[in-house]
Amino acid sequence: MKNSKFYRSKIVIVFVLVTMTMSIQNALAQGISVYQYRKVQDDKVQEFIRRETTYWSEVAQKAVDDGKLQFWGLFQKVGGYDLDNTSNFLFINTFPDIDNTGEIWDVSAVFPDLPMEVMETYSMSKNTSVIFVKSQHWEQVANANPENDFKYITMVYHNANNPTGLIAAEIEIWAPFIKSAMDEGKTTQKAWGNALILSPTGEDIKYNTISFDIYPSLKEALDPTWDESLEAPDMTKIGEAEGNRRGSVVYRAVKVVDASQ
């Protein structure tokens, strides 16, 4: 009889753990990210970074701790073209509930004694684009150390013939290949992921999916190292879905607040 109670207890515990795991996975799967591209005045860049990392990252941390935000990241573009008219920073915010985001940015709740004028960054910058994105898949090297490994990100924007087909093909073909290569030390890349652009969409929008290549250094982001023994998988399905129309930008990770870390 005691054994019966013991096994029933184990079953309940396992069920609770499985349910919790599924709930976490579902929450992450349901999260929608807002990508905010920002143009910061050249003579204000250092002050912009200081204010964002000193004040607004703490506001984001409180939102993460309260379960209202899953991810906050500030990324600085490396290089670029038409620099006078294009963004040089990117914010990524991932919300578990995209309909409830406003109260998150109440900086007075974290810094009640500081005036807004010493913390705000809008006067030194402007939004150039805002898009809504849903993450689809993520792989990272085993025993990754994000602080050291995730310093630079190459964001590859795809104008795919078949966006959902490309996402599926990447998950089927590229994800296991890059995961194995990273774990076996045959590439200096440390993580990879992809995402679907939810809005805006249409003929005037150049890209509909994004993939992410994460590296520990700028050198590797610009010129990745691959072991010569690596054999690439058959990329036919990916190529057909993508249509070979893409653009890429390298960003430096300035500051990240992540609920999973």
Image (cartoon, rainbow, N blue to C red):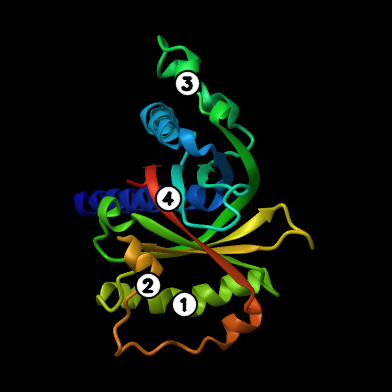
Disc 4 element? helix
Disc 3 element? helix
98 over 163 or under it: above or below: above
- In the rendered structure, which disc, 1 or 4, sits on the residue that comes first in sequence? 4
Measure the C-alpha gap from mark 4 to mark 2: 43 Å
Disc 2 element? loop
Amino acid under disc 1: Trp
Measure the C-alpha gap from mark 1 to mark 4: 29 Å
Quadrant in the rendering for residue 46: top left
- In the rendered structure, which disc, 1 or 2, sits on the residue that comes first in sequence? 1
Q: Which residue is mark 4?
A: 19
Q: Does residue 140 show up?
A: no
Residue 141 position within the rendered picture, expressed as x and y whole percent measured from the top left: 30, 66
23 over 137 or under it: above or below: above
x 39%, y 62%: residue? 214
Q: Which residue is mark 2?
A: 223
